[in-house]
Structures are given as C-alpha cells and as structure tokens.
Image: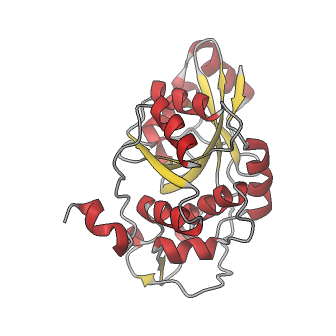
Amino acid sequence: MTILTRGADRLLELHASELPQKDELCGCFWATLALRLHGEESVEQDDVALLAGSAITSHGHQHVLPLGQAGRNDFRVELPLTDDDDASGTSAHGVVRAVEEITGGRLVALPVPGLGAPALRALLRAAAEGTAPVALVANVQTGAFWGSHPTAAQLAAYLERGDLDAGPPADWSVGHFVGLLGLDEGRAGALVTVADTYPAIGLGGVHLQPVEAVASALTGRGVLVIAEPDVAQRVAAAAGGAGELWDNGSPIPAAVGSAARGG
C-alpha cells in the first residue's frame, strides 16, 4: 500500500520548479517549499537564509555536490561567509526560526528527533491523514542511504524479504536536508519516498529508501514537521511527540542559540 503526505502532489510540483537548491542552502530550499505549500508564494531561499542565520563557505562548496551535479550561486543577498566547511549551511534551529517569523506563527516547524523505523512509519502515516498540508523536512546523513538508483530487483528483494543488503551503496555522504513524502509498504519492507534538492539524485531528485536506512540517516538528527500548529502537534504525537532540537554544526541564530545550547 502506498500513502502520500497531505499536499505531496503540490509539494512535488513546487520541488520540480525550484531545483536545484542554491549552494549550501538545502535547509532553506525545503523551508521555502514548505512555506509556498502553505500559501507563502513569494518567499525565496535567500529570505529564509537571512532569518535562519545560514552561512556559506568562502571558497565554494563544489566538493560536496553529487556526482554530475552543477552548483547554483544566484544569490539575491549577501550571506555570511565561513572558512569552515563543517560550520556552513543552515541549522535546524534556523529553519524553525525562519518558518515561524515569516508566517507570524501561523506555521510551526516542530522537531521530532531520534526516530527509529516504527516511529518513522507512524510519522508518515499521520502526515497522510486529515486535509491540511504537512511538510516533513528531514535532516539526514546521506551516507546511511542506499544509492538513489536501485534496480527493480533490488527494491523487490527488500519489499518482499526485507533484504536491507540488496541495495546499491550510497551516492554520497554529507549532512543534508531532504523531504519525506510517502510510504510504500510491502510484505516485509517499507520504502520511503524521499525528495532531494538535486536532480542528479534519483529521478529528478526523487528516490526510494528503506525505512530503516532513513531512520539510520536520522541518527543524532531528526525531522521537522512544518504545518499549522495543531496539525503539526498531531503528526508529531504519532511518533512520540516533539522533542529537543539537534545541533548539526551549522550556525544557530542568536535569538535561539542561548536556549538551544543551555547557556
């Protein structure tokens, strides 16, 4: 059985029209799509980046692009620069701040950290219920994924027998934000529909991943549920409820930094 998160059809249309992300702004890319899904049609990746406290590397970021993928640096604003690759990009804290500030609190981005495979399934099922759109933005380590071009036989082996070793090795290994849009459950395995920020990944940026691989990629990180507050609370509750934000190494905006770091 295949289920899609509410609004996934529209989100995929927005996704296709915005690809690829601007360099080092994967979190801002997904926040932008989630905001547009909820009616904030004029918002741009740069708008989110300014509020989120995003930073880009001074020497460029080509070395972490997927194979065959060109970068995109048509920034509309000047963003802070850093010489540290590990300190560039956008934090989960920044995405939360940008979503709430741009919408004046009409939308929230609730963090659900530390999801195992059962909780992740529950989260996706809950995001498919109701009528209001929901965007699930996952902060992952892509090295835990299968490669994004598995064969039909590899997918069948996993769905029928739960063979996690059937898939190809990961395409790349970086900290990244992706969208989770659906769940396809077989006799033994369950595949998550994942949308990337680069069209070189999967088919136009969309690929299928074993739910266990996605859960592994979320270790030490988590999913942001972006929706109206009551909807986000309902969806998060299905996976154990909202929790603490995680630190992915990217800059944490000053407005939330002291609370996030406990001092």
The image shows residue 159 at horizontal and vertical percentages of 63, 19
The one of 7 and 158 positioned closer to us in this rendering: 7
Task: Give the farthest residue toward the left.
Answer: 263
Q: Is residue 175 above or below residue 218?
A: below
Q: Is residue 112 above or below residue 32?
A: above
Residue 214 in sight: yes
The image shows residue 171 at horizontal and vertical percentages of 58, 48
Q: Is residue 203 above or below residue 91?
A: above
Q: Quadrant of the N terminus?
A: top right
The image shows residue 175 at horizontal and vertical percentages of 46, 56
Left or right position of 217 against 258? right
The one of 114 and 238 positioned closer to us in this rendering: 238
The one of 57 and 25 positioned closer to us in this rendering: 25
| Residue at 53% over, 79% down | 60
Q: Is residue 155 above or below residue 112?
A: above
| Residue at 65% over, 66% down | 21
Q: Quadrant of residue 230?
A: top right
| Residue at 34% over, 58% down | 247
The image shows residue 131 at horizontal and vertical percentages of 71, 36
Left or right position of 232 against 261? right
Q: How many marks?
A: 0
User: How is the model colour-coded?
Assistant: secondary structure
Q: Quadrant of the C terminus?
A: bottom left
Residue 227 in sight: no
The one of 193 and 151 positioned closer to us in this rendering: 193
